[in-house]
Amino acid sequence: MFKKIVLKNGLRVVSVPLKNTQTATVLVLAATGSKYETREINGISHFLEHLLFKGTKKRPTPVDIAEPLDRAGGVYNAFTGEEYTGYYVKAEAGHFDLGLDVISDIYLNSKLDPAEIEKERGVIIEEINMYYDHPSSYVQILWNKMLYGDQPAGWEITGTKQSVSKISRQDLVRYVQNQYAAENTIVCFAGNIPSEKEIVRKTEKYFSGIRANKALKKPKVIEKQTSPALILHKRETDQCHLYLGVRGYDIFHPKKYAFEVLADILGGMMSSRLFVKIREEMGAAYYISADAESSSDTGFLAAKAGVDNKKIDSVISAILEEYRKAKEKKIDSKELKKSKEHIIGKMSLLLETSDAQASFYGVQETLEKNILTPKEIYDKINKVSAEDILAAAKEIFRPENLNLAIIGKFEDEKRFQKLLKI
């Protein structure tokens, strides 16, 4: 069973002891990401994620950080999202103190060396180029841009080449000082970890230097749509890539679990409706799936696919037909049972490791300031009825709610706009 403790300085500590594992994970999450940025510093959260591994006063070079962890056989990395940035070390339990020492050191004491900033600026620009060169990745960037436009929710997590080129060391220092504060930080431990008392003592020791200022809040996301929307990006490709879906529910919405089950039925597995229809019956796509994505203030359900250029119209129509069926007829008990078992089974498999457990509990605390155990979530999924799913489908699958992003060798937007009917 997990334990959550709030230290005197406001730092939140979550511990998740696990039996039958020899590993321990230390994960530090800052409740900040691309949704907290301004246009001038778009990409700064991600920029910092790269830079924190480049040197501290105690460990001046990237090798000084990496070598002790490598010697211990540790796995370490970082990640940036719209609403959080995470840094973690997973290692054999005997190296717990090393992992905590390194992660706390880079989080609190990064040098942000000017030479490293300039080198990493070039690395990130190449990362942006990489995403652009992969249509299956870039179409998701277009999708967010179409849904949310020129506001943080619609911007790229990596930033643009223009914004990354202009971020200064002063910008980076100011952002760390504002956002990497005690009240904005969650330290999560999972696996073969010390006692709760020891966890608190060690956290107080290693994070004694954390700032106590108030962190900046993110702006409210503005969502407005009155008719189907389309974004078409022309590119000479052998297959076109698309996102086709609707706005949905955030993580606090009462229909969130029905929303997730609906997406799973549509495209969450190889026996899902869209996979069987588009790939098995039509032979029109190699990859086809549907996901429900929810954050603290936004949500959407979308099918994504790489499609034979000649079959794009029929694939769009087939996806919309499955959306139509979902809102017109209740799913039968057999299909509902299969989906619930799939979601719960997949989640159980994903949570077998200490790093996955740390993320599971830490991200919930970051976004919701409330934590449910896996069993509590399984219970909520099992309570979803066919009527719940039908009600959610009727609410989200409306004509004015449709959105389509396409990358391919097409120019005629009207051709696709005519298809956006449900």
Image (cartoon, grey):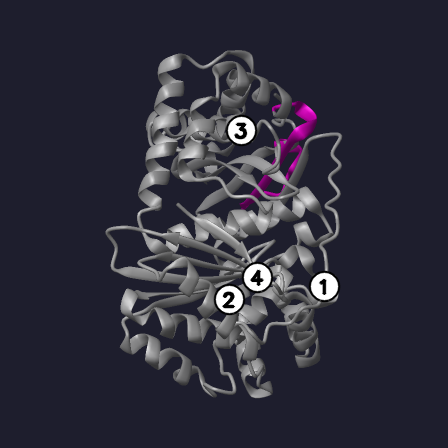
Q: What amino acid is at disc 3? A: Phe
Instruction: Find residue 223 and report its horizontal and vertical position in percent.
Output: 73, 39
The answer to which image quadrant residue 24 occupies is bottom left
The image's mark for residue 259 is 3
> What segment carries the magenta color?
397-416
Q: Is residue 44 above or below residue 350?
A: below
Q: Of label 3 and label 2, which has the lower sequence position?
A: 2
Q: Nearer the viewer, mark 2 or mark 4?
A: 4
State the residue position of label 1.
214
Q: What amino acid is at disc 1? A: Lys
Residue sitting at 55 percent across and 64 percent down? 128
State the residue position of label 2.
127
Q: Is residue 349 above or below residue 183?
A: above
Q: Are marks 2 and 1 in contact (CB under 8 Å)?
A: no
Q: Are marks 3 and 1 in contact (CB under 8 Å)?
A: no
Q: Secondary structure at mark 3?
A: helix
Task: Say whether residue 404 is magenta.
Answer: yes
Around disc 4, counting alpha carbons within 10 Å, would you say few (fewer than 14), some (14 to 19), or many (20 or more)? some
Q: Is residue 113 left or right of residue 261?
A: right
The alpha-carbon separation of the residues under discs 2 and 1 comes to: 32 Å
Q: What amino acid is at disc 4? A: Leu
Q: Nearer the viewer, residue 375 or 40?
A: 375
Residue sitting at 60 percent across and 72 percent down? 210
Q: Are marks 2 and 4 in contact (CB under 8 Å)?
A: no
Q: How many marks?
A: 4
Q: Of label 3 and label 4, which has the lower sequence position?
A: 4
The answer to which image quadrant residue 218 occupies is bottom right
Instruction: Find residue 41 and report its horizontal and vertical position in percent.
Output: 70, 67
Q: Are marks 3 and 4 in contact (CB under 8 Å)?
A: no
The alpha-carbon separation of the residues under discs 3 and 1 comes to: 35 Å
The alpha-carbon separation of the residues under discs 2 and 4 comes to: 38 Å
Q: Of label 2 and label 4, which has the lower sequence position?
A: 4
